[in-house]
Amino acid sequence: MRSFLYVIFFIFLFSACSNHSSNKISINKNKVVPSELQAKYQEVELVGFIHFTVNTFTDKEWGYGDENPSIFNPTQLDAEQWAKTAKEAGLTELILTAKHHDGFCLWPSEYTEHSIKNSPYKNGEGDIVREFVSACKKYDLKAGLYLSPWDRNHADYGKPEYITYYRNQLRELLTNYGKISEIWLDGANGGDGYYGGANEIRKIDRDTYYDWENTFSIIRELQPEALIFSDAGPDIHWIGNEHGFAGETFWSMMDPTKVTIGGADQDYLNTGDPKGTDWILGQCDVSIRPGWFYHQKEDTLVKSPQQLVDIYYKSVGRNAMLLLNIPPDRRGLLHETDVKNLLDFKAILDETFNTNLAADQTITATNSVKNKNFVASNMLDTNKTSFWIAQNNSQSAEITIQFNTPTEFDRILLQEPIRYGQRISKFTVGAEINGELKMIYEGTTIGNKRLLRFNPILSSKIIISIDEANNAPAISNIGVYKASIRE
Ligand code: FUL
């Protein structure tokens, strides 16, 4: 009896110790991880771009800077229509071109006459930046602003005085309009323009002229929570093309010393860098129309809902964010076709992704860390922060989903818990079809979200094999879907 009690006591002691030690297991974070602001931002996936200025009225893409402000006259402008549509389409932020390359300002800047204050819009009393920010607030959207560094109107462009002007404008925008979530800096820089009547070509040195570091510190000081977008980050970077496609392999890390704003290697931007020293999110900008600004002649060329869905797979589904441009027309409204296609795009995504066919199925994994907080079932729950992770020293693992009955599917979603870093660089997906294991997908990176598309299969077993990773592989979510017939 006595020895029996000893045995019970030792079993109790052992399990208490192992529980204790398992709770102490520390999950190694990668060296390069996102800031909390970046991690939250990436989760929102979809952002809208609003290109609107004198170009809408001159039918140009790049205004020369010599426009007479009197041409700017939207007759039915309704920023709430933009915001309401964006909200219904699942976008979480809108970014407005407060100033494009023509230098025309959509707010009554005190530093220039080339603005809305000299236009017929609201008899010169209008402020579209304010209307935009209020509409975003009403519909619970974040509001970002585009302030073109290149200014084809300003007489001082190319001289040091222009940098002071640019910073003054930035201060106006960042102090007078409440919370701004993103400042968007395009890379188009220098060339011909009006330049206060000089009508000449002005070239600048991209590396030195703008002194970006000091401009960025103004942004950080005035709006510490605003993320900065440019070719080179520091928070979000251009994806290297304007089709909305991230690379098949896409890392959220990058080496900012290898890129300059306006002069970056587009292939590098398109794939990111597994050895990158900084976490910089990828954002894929693309327009719903051929141009960035509204042109009536493009009314028949609006991207279809299916084309937009394809772009979604190649941007959000490749670990980047989608920044989709929806340009208001001369009335100041989003065109009916653009609205319809955008809402249909959202409806198709919902049809495809609303039901995770694997939700109640059985999931197991090899090499799992011995800790009840990181079990395989975390990959199928609806909690976004829970995850499964392999043992500290492993770089591979196999995850199996066993269905109760054969199930038809053609889409798989995979997500890594990016707050711990982006780890996986090689994986395959196999499925048991008629009792035989067949390879259905070979992939590289996963990151925040990876969406796999393949022809429909009927199977009751999926095996995801993670073959290479820079740290113990971890997965936060797996989804299995049957695509909407409208895709
Ligand atoms: C580019 C600009 O030149 C285009 O006009 C557009 O604004 C695009 C989003 O960024 O750099």
Image (spheres, rainbow, N blue to C red):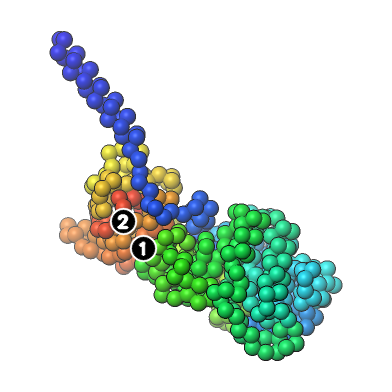
Residue 112 visible from this viewpoint? yes
Tell me where residue 16 sits by quadrant.
Answer: top left
- Compared to 367, does 16 lie above or below? above
For the residue pair 166 and 67, the one nearer the viewer reads as 166
Q: Residues within 10 Å of mark 1 (few under 14, many from 20)?
A: some
> Could you tell me which quadrant the N terminus lies in?
top left
Residue beneath the point at 21% across and 58% down: 432
In the picture as drawn, the residue positioned furthest to the right comes out as 123
Which amino acid does the dot numbered 2 rest on? Asn
Residue beneath the point at 21% across and 18% down: 8
Q: Which mark is residue 274?
A: 1
Q: Position of residue 358 (x, y in %)?
A: 34, 51
> Could you tell me which quadrant the C terminus lies in?
bottom left
**Element marked by disc 1:** loop
Residue beneath the point at 35% across and 46% down: 28
Tell me where residue 319 sits by quadrant.
Answer: bottom left
Which amino acid does the dot numbered 1 rest on? Pro
Count of marks, rendered view: 2
Tell me where residue 11 sits by quadrant.
Answer: top left
Q: Residues within 10 Å of mark 2 (few under 14, many from 20)?
A: some
Marks 1/2 in contact by CB < 8 Å: the verdict is yes
- Compared to 76, does 133 lie above or below? above
- Compared to 205, does 147 lie above or below? above
Q: Position of residue 392 (x, y in %)?
A: 28, 46
The residue indicated by pointer 2 is: 470
Q: Is residue 231 left or right of residue 136?
A: left
Q: Is residue 98 left or right of residue 478?
A: right
Task: Calculate the distance from the C-alpha at mark 1 to the C-alpha at mark 2.
Answer: 9 Å
Q: Position of residue 58 (x, y in %)?
A: 70, 84
**Element marked by disc 2:** loop
Q: Position of residue 315 (x, y in %)?
A: 45, 67
